[in-house]
Image (tube, grey):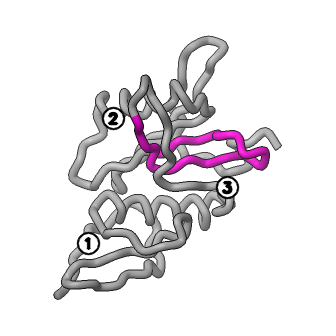
Amino acid sequence: MEIILPRLNLPTYNIRLREVAGKYDVFDPLRRKYVALTPEEWVRQHFVNFLIEQRDYPSGLMANEVSLNLNGLSRRCDTVVYDRHVRPRVIVEYKRPTVRITQKVFDQISRYNIVMQVDYLIISNGLDHYCCKMDYEHQTYTFIQNIPNFSEVTSD
């Protein structure tokens, strides 16, 4: 069985895949296990690799599928980046490449941020990437051109 995966607007890397019973799994270095390879997971693994390799994010301060409680409902952030004091600083939300980034996606990550109160929100479908910096003092946010380096998102 041949696997056809979309080309993303992210650097390629040596992704670890395995086939089990005709389906593919991908190794997630943050969760330290193989997970089902879905289009969204394809984006997540490439984006996490980009953050680690291109933006100097320490893998030990990142987590995938972080649970949170929002108005009594259990939700999961796709990726959360913490500072060296283990305070959440960035939430990243992924969509599969065929999903357009719309206001609905921003509303979703904004709801997660009600609980997390991070400084940066990032959304990617692997083709388009958006990052905004929160300004809690003025209750607003600013879109920034590039995904910041780890040193820019931490106060350490």
Question: How much space separates mark 3 and mark 2, taking CA atoms?
Answer: 24 Å
Q: Residue at x 39, y 74 (%)?
A: 26
User: 108 above or below 96?
Assistant: above
Q: Residue at x 47, y 76 (%)?
A: 13
- Under mark 1, the amino acid is Leu
Element carrying mark 2: helix
Q: Main secondary structure of the magenta part?
A: strand
The residue at which mark 2 appears reads as: 105
Q: Mark 3, residues whose alpha carbon is within 10 Å: few (<14), some, or many (≥20)?
A: some
Q: Nearer the viewer, residue 73 or 94?
A: 73
Question: How much space separates mark 1 and mark 2, taking CA atoms?
Answer: 23 Å
Element carrying mark 3: helix
User: 103 above or below 92?
Assistant: above
The residue at which mark 1 appears reads as: 5
Give the left or right position of residue 131, taking residue 82 as reference.
Answer: left
Outermost residue, front side? 72
Residue 41 occupies quadrant:
bottom left
First in sequence, mark 1 or 3: give its number: 1
Q: Which residues are magenta?
A: 74-92
Question: Which-is-in-front pick, marks 1 and 3?
Answer: 3
The residue at which mark 3 appears reads as: 61
Give the left or right position of residue 38, taking residue 126 as reference.
Answer: left
First in sequence, mark 3 or 2: give its number: 3
Whether residue 69 appears in magenta in the rendering, the answer is no
Q: x, y (%) of residue 27?
A: 45, 75
Question: How much space separates mark 1 and mark 3, taking CA atoms?
Answer: 28 Å
Question: Which-is-in-front pick, marks 3 and 2?
Answer: 3
Q: Quadrant of the C terminus?
A: top right
